[in-house]
Image: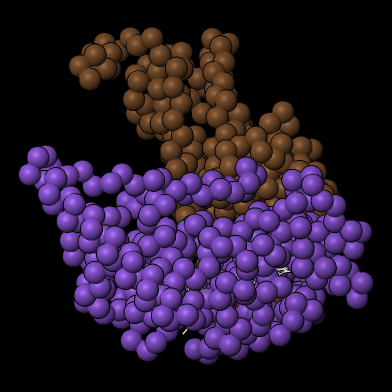
Chain colours: A purple, B brown
Amino acid sequence: MKTATITKRIIVVSLILFTLIYSCRKEEVSEPQPPALTPYEVVYPGWIPQLPENGANPMTVEGVALGRRLYYDTLLSNNGQSCSSCHNQNLSFSDSTVNSLPHINLGWNFAFLWNGHVQGTLEDAMMFEVEQFFQTDISRLNASTFYRAEFKKVFRTEVITSREVAFALAQFVRSIVTFDSRFDRYMGFVEMLNMQELSGYSIFNSERGDCFHCHPVGLFTDNRFHNNGLDSVYNPQTWGVYGETGDPSDMGKYKTPSLRNVALTAPYMHDGRFATLEDVVMFYNTGVNITSTVDPIMTKPNHVYGLNLSVQEMSDLVAFLRCLTDTSLAGNPAYSNPW
Amino acid sequence: MVFASCRTESYDPEYAELRIQVLHNCGNGPLLYDTLIYQNAAGESYQVEHLEYYISGITLYGSNGSRYHDDGIYYVNARENPQMIIHLDSIAPGSYYRMTCNVGIDSNRNEYGYLPNTMENAGMAWPEFMGGGYHFIKLEGHFQGAALWGFAVHLGSDSVLPTCSTNSQLALKYINHTATLTMDVNEWFQNPHTYSFINDGNYTMGNQLLMGKIRDNGSDIFSLQQNN
């Protein structure tokens, strides 16, 4: 495995060296034009909201490929980890031990991490990961002939900085989209859901279960922060956005996670307190705590906090959540380890 | 550029233009969020946390019997985008005495997919199981009951579309008039129905009776003031 990687690197490096030498010779005649980059198009169904573009970092096939290499490269960290160590393709790019947030459809997001610590574009989020979380030693990338050539090709820079690293990572992560669940095929009129799943869908997407207000059908997240009533007392482990803003009305608010592939991302909630989807639904049914900052949507008619779902309805709802799994994501070669 | 300013100064443009800033009050002052300082007509203290809605079908009634109608559907998120401006152009110069509009979207266009496919509009989808289309308004907060309870006043589906009207004088002759359109949030809970979160309900969605009361109360939520 390792030798194969090294051989591959040597081949790539020699190819680049060859190209460089070749272009040096040509330089005598005319200014060498850097090879044109191929625009990368993110493909998603028409009924999904438009993917916001970042004009400062247009996606290219070459940029996405470079980001993918970085994502799987332990060179970025100082402890032998890569992004993929905690963001595992088989688990919707999440991890069950550290309860990381999945990397799917993140291009639609403008606030990141459970407590919203990073606000801005995906590029900003990646900048945080590179500079603050990994504290990447950029000189190691600059020492790599392979990366120097790749970054030059994609960003036209001689010297790599954390900005280009973040931009390349953002291009790759923005390319990770997942819209091929059974529910998507149902929406595309190519597959039927069974009676139980349809019942779960109608509970999810009506005032009965009222999940759609925060997890709207489509991306299944509203990209906002809410207190969904998990706790009645607050401490640094449960206060969420308040820890960032100091605003008492933010107490207990956390990022609404997307429910796409939710069957793959156990355990659940920011602290992984629920092991199963059944536990989660049970919580929404009977476990919601009333505090002054719990989201108004959590109060149901007649000031009841809880859904009053029958055992059957709860299992219907879980059956629907399981329809949101895109089984093609794990094996998608476009996102796998390229080394 | 020169051409445009000539038109401004001539005082006799073919068309007037009006930029309307949308503002939000609650009771006597500007709407403040997350503070339990408001009281509805039923005597309940409440606070507002979220206000999101559409304005559409803006119509101005001219003193000479003419009418100006704007086709736009405008998304308003009072808290996240407080600088909302609606731009009306090609208005026949003259004086106007009344404005009407809808909070929400008229039945001809209230079909999911009609509006551009943005995150905002997707978040306003009204579930197909409940009639489809879009939420007209989401007004959410907490009120003082036995505890601080939540309320979610949501409207959707054609039969509860609020029609709002305000009598205000507009004298339009330039291309650069401005006005402010102010919603008094407290009016959603009074006139003609005194709405109580405790006795009527804290959660309107799926309840035709409650949504109907809020629709009726919506008729006088706006006032329009010309600035220049």
Task: Report the side of A140 relative to A333 (left or right).
Answer: left
Q: Residue furthest left?
A: A28
Image position, residue A326 (x, y; %): 68, 62
As drawn, B175 above or below A193:
above
Query: Could you tell me if residue B143 is visible in this image?
Result: no
Image position, residue A135 (x, y; %): 31, 81
As drawn, A107 above or below A230:
above
Depth check, front residue: B193 or A111: A111
Q: Residue at x 71, y 85 (%)?
A: A275
Image position, residue A279 (x, y; %): 76, 82
Q: Residue at x 41, y 45 (%)?
A: A39
Image position, residue A329 (x, y; %): 63, 64
Depth check, front residue: B80 or A120: A120
Depth check, front residue: B215 or A149: A149
Task: Report the side of B47 relative to A188 (left or right).
Answer: left
As drawn, A62 above or below A275:
above
Q: Quadrant of residue A288?
A: bottom right
Task: Report the side of B73 relative to A16 (left or right).
Answer: right
Number of numbered labels in the structure image: 0
Q: Quadrant of the C terminus of chain A?
A: bottom left
